[in-house]
Amino acid sequence: MLDCCVCSKNERSAMQAQRPGFSQQADRMESPSKGDLCGVGISFRCDDEKRILMVDSLVHGGPASVSGVIMKNDVLVEVAGVDVRRTSVDEIGKLILGPQRSSVKMVFERYGKDPAGRGVSGQRI
């Protein structure tokens, strides 16, 4: 699971431990000013067979939840203009995470229903 909400490093490590082989790199990512990087309030689950990330949950009141566009089971297809299908979880994390209050555009497909995708821009929290 890649957790993209603001949480303590201990909580993030506990969530990462639920998925064998998940890199602990997210705990070490820092911005140039040495501050922690932030996400948009989405927890993903990985479908290893299809090599896709699906929305597992949204942080209530977070940017993704407030957008009203993203739903559980949506498939992440693009982050910041980069097609992320078949991209490693670590690389996707680097694209999603950024400085607090910065924005990132993400495109999702409604799993099995929306091949055109749904774009949403959100501010990192």
Image (cartoon, rainbow, N blue to C red):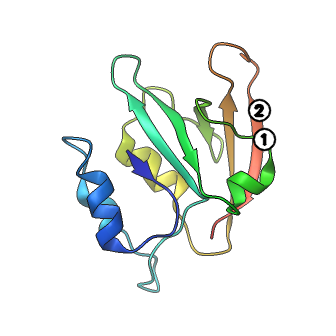
Q: Which mark is residue 69?
A: 1
Of 123 and 59, nearer the camera is: 59
Where's residue 17, x and y in %? 23, 51
Quarter of the figure with residue 36: bottom left
Label 1 amino acid? Val
Above or below 117: residue 115: above
Circle 2 residue: 118
Above or below 30: residue 112: above
Quarter of the figure with residue 123: bottom right
38 relative position to 20: left or right: right
Query: What element does badge 2 sit on?
Result: strand
**Residue drawn where x is 76% and y is 45% of the image:** 120
Of 77 and 63, nearer the camera is: 63
Of 35 and 109, nearer the camera is: 109
Q: Residue furthest left?
A: 21
**Residue drawn where x is 61% and y is 36% of the image:** 78
Query: What element does badge 1 sit on?
Result: loop
108 relative position to 3: left or right: right
6 relative position to 21: left or right: right
* Mark closest to the chain's N terminus, 2 or 1: 1
Q: Is residue 28 visible from the viewing direction of this image? A: no
Foreground mark, 2 or 1, reads 1
The answer to whether marks 2 and 1 mark residues whose Cβ atoms lie closer than 8 Å is yes
**Residue drawn where x is 71% and y is 60% of the image:** 63
For disc 2, the neighbor class at 10 Å (few under 14, some 14 to 19, many from 20) is: some
Where's residue 114, x and y in %? 74, 18
Above or below 103: residue 47: above
Label 2 amino acid? Arg
Above or below 111: residue 70: below
